[in-house]
Amino acid sequence: MKKIILALAAASGIALAAPAFADHHMGSEVDEAHIKDTAHFLKMHGEQLSAAINHPSREKDRVRDAYRHPLETLAFFHVGPEMKVGEYAPGGEWYSRLLGHYLGGEGQLVGLFFNPVLFSTDPARQQGVRDAAAKFPQDVASFTGLPADRFAGMTMENIPAEQKGTFDRILIIRMMHNIMRWNFADSEIKAMRELLKDDGLIGIVQHRAKPDAPWSYANGTKGYVREQDIIDFMRINGFELVASSEINANPKDTADHKEGVWEMPPTLATKREDLKGLGESDRMTLLFKKAK
């Protein structure tokens, strides 16, 4: 399957990192099928995705591409340009700027923000979340040059009935540790399940703890979570694992830092010289579907 995908990418003029698809877990039939589908996806949409990634407005963002593998990641999640896609907790909007270009023509990017009532008991902070959601379309419009009405923003509070069952994909990028340590992951994931179409998928990229890491380290407070814990958590909340990938793996990350993931680049919170140049954190990349 690796050769098929790389050959299709080369035929389309798409540059892929050499190991990106080489490390898919190949032990199950579901992964085999998904890789075949990914090869087809790249043949259909690879040029559009590559064009969005290489847009001139992403010049500053592009320095992180080598560590975040946006083409391979979005292809693995099968994010098509015509889809309605929710980006959960956009934050710094690194993915928003890319997805805005990619989805702004045929599809729709929706910023999904925390349920403000669960996020904080402070009314001012709650309103800040609502304001960020309202401002999201204009933010994306400002760096894509596309009309703001091509995009949308909403909180996970009181989801409108007309939004339920309308999303093709929801992406949770490096955020599971936060909603788990803040103790509202269950309700947020359940709300996302309501937003997804029956065949909709959730894609997760998350800092990965070692399988034998103690719970005190892997409970989200250090930024790292055990991969099996995420899989089990999603299963409990109505999802089945479709496939996993090593696209965003980084074996140089020992994932045992005293101050957590923030010691790693790009944050380098403790300015440790031995961590510079190692790339970003080791990350799991998981794709889930709604359980029947």
Image (cartoon, rainbow, N blue to C red):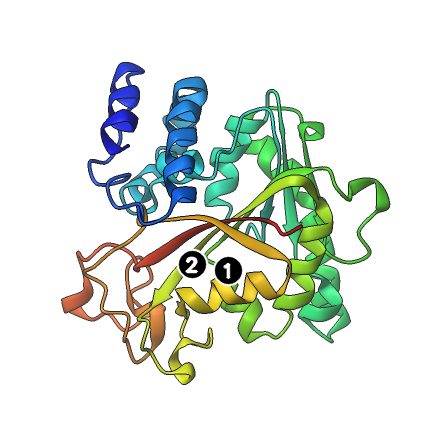
Query: Would residue 253 be seen by someone viewing this image from the given angle?
Result: yes
Q: Quadrant of residue 106?
A: top right
Instruction: Give the residue pinned by disc 1.
Output: 175
Judge left or right: residue 93 versus residue 73: right
The answer to whether the residue labelled 2 contacts the one labelled 1, judged by CB atoms less than 8 Å apart, is yes
Mark 2: which secondary structure?
strand
Judge left or right: residue 183 versus residue 22: right
Judge left or right: residue 269 versus residue 103: left
Instruction: Give the residue pinned by disc 2.
Output: 206
User: What residue is drawn where x is 41% and y is 76%?
Assistant: 218
User: What residue is drawn where x is 24% and y is 40%?
Assistant: 22
How far across and down, in percent of the image, does residue 123 sit?
Answer: 77, 70
- Disc 1 marks a residue whose amino acid type is Met
Q: Quadrant of residue 163?
A: top right
Q: Is residue 79 above or below residue 154?
A: above
How far across and down, in percent of the image, does residue 200 sit?
Answer: 62, 40
Judge left or right: residue 87 versus residue 137: left
Mark 1: which secondary structure?
loop
User: What residue is drawn where x is 69% and y is 65%?
Assistant: 187
Count of all numbered marks drawn on residues in the image? 2
Q: Is residue 245 above or below residue 274?
A: above
How far across and down, in percent of the image, does residue 217 sit?
Answer: 38, 80
> Quarter holding the N terminus?
top left
Q: Residues within 10 Å of mark 1 (few under 14, many from 20)?
A: many
Q: Nearer the viewer, mark 2 or mark 1?
A: 2
Query: Would residue 60 be seen by someone viewing this image from the given angle?
Result: no
- Residue at the limit of the structure toward the left, as seen here: 274
- Disc 2 marks a residue whose amino acid type is Gln
